[in-house]
Amino acid sequence: MPIRTSTVRAFLTCLSILACAATPALAHKPAASIPAADLIQPADFAAALQQSKTPKPLILQVGFRKAYAQAHIPDAEYVGEADEEDGLRSLQNRVAKLPKDSSIVIYCGCCPWRKCPNIAAAYDALHDLGFKNVKVLYFADDFGTNWVDEGYPTTKGS
Amino acid sequence: MLRSCAAASALGLLLLAAGAWANGLGDAAPDFTRTDFTGRQVHLADYRGKLVLLNFWASWCGPCLEEMPRFSAWQRAYAAAGLQVIGVSMDDVAAPAKRLLARQPVDYPVVLGDAKLGETYGGVLGLPLTFLIDHRGYIVARFRGEADLAQMEAKIKSLLAEPR
């Protein structure tokens, strides 16, 4: 018995609708998966930045560019949203030639911590590359609330 | 005398800076004109006389996507009473925001924001971020992060009920 083209098309449409419905809109590894021992509180990091004797870590912002352009931690580099393929690749490229014992601090602050799509992806990527000296700035609310509003140092520009 | 002049100048500079970075309640909402994703001009000042809900969001922001269907429902429910919702996407480019809106349409205009617009609103350094702008064009409420939507709706209803 021949199958009509319209029947096949309707079947495929139903399948695609079901697939979309079954796929969560945003499936991110939660920030809570990052071990507490690797988190730094903003106040502690701000204090560490003031100390001229200690060598500065590489600071990478893994959130959205428009926030970075408005304000970021001095000397922080923008690498892009780690949840996106481009951002992740940019992060991997940035650290590709660094010794594995490099001190790296990453931060995002795009959204409330437990909803951040980027930070755990960036942390995992660095660990997968063999970096063990990675710390993560903990922003419970967002970068504006937990860093800028606290009066910690910022600079602007992309 | 010189000291008073210096203090007055410093205060003046501070006030100028505050004007440029409108982020507090009672500040005039910085005006802007942008083309929305359907090609229409959105000029904030054109909505004077309405209560404007200005929502900064992004396609990758989970809490933003949870709020937007509610904002869309409010746009339908309270439009006649004078509410106008405007969305400002802080995505790097329009494409992901447009794709998201194709899957999850909203009943209000959405424009692409930038760092400059963010700065005029005191810095959009975390999402979602929502402002309520009264019929005279002044910021009367600001909600950062995951807002209590019941509280936000109550505020909207009370503002819409105020005599003009």
Image: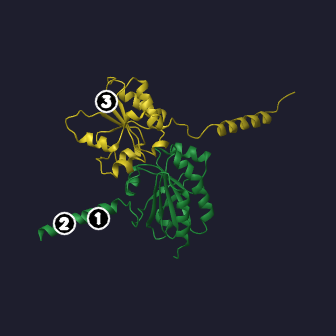
Chain colours: A yellow, B green
Q: Residue at x 69, y 37 (%)?
A: A18
Q: Which residue is drawn at 39% across and 23% down?
A: A130
For the residues labelled 3 and 2, the Cα–Cα distance comes to 44 Å
Q: Position of residue B33 (x, y in %)?
A: 46, 59
Q: Are marks 1 and 2 on the same chain?
A: yes
**A147 sits to left or right of A124:** left
For the residues labelled 3 and 1, the Cα–Cα distance comes to 41 Å
Q: Which residue is drawn at 25% across and 66% down?
A: B12
Q: Where is residue A14 in the image (x, y as percent from the top left)?
A: 73, 38
Q: Is residue A158 visible?
A: no
Q: Position of residue B141 (x, y in %)?
A: 46, 63
| Secondary element at tag 1 | helix
Would you call the spot at circle 1 few (<14 residues within 10 Å), some (14-19), or many (20 or more)? Answer: few
Q: Outermost residue, bottom direction?
A: B163
Q: Do the residues labelled 1 and 2 touch (CB within 8 Å)?
A: no
How many marks on residues? 3
- Residue type indicated by callout 2: Ala
Residue with the mark numbered 2:
B7
- Residue type indicated by callout 3: Ser
Q: Do labels 3 and 2 share a chain?
A: no
Q: In this view, does B164 lie above or below B143?
A: below
- Could you say which quadrant of the image residue A125 lies in? top left
Which labelled disc corresponds to residue A103?
3
Q: Do labels 3 and 1 share a chain?
A: no
Residue with the mark numbered 1:
B15
- Residue type indicated by callout 1: Leu
**B3 sits to left or right of A50:** left
Would you call the spot at circle 3 few (<14 residues within 10 Å), some (14-19), or many (20 or more)? Answer: some
**A47 sits to left or right of B156:** left
Q: Is residue A68 visible?
A: yes
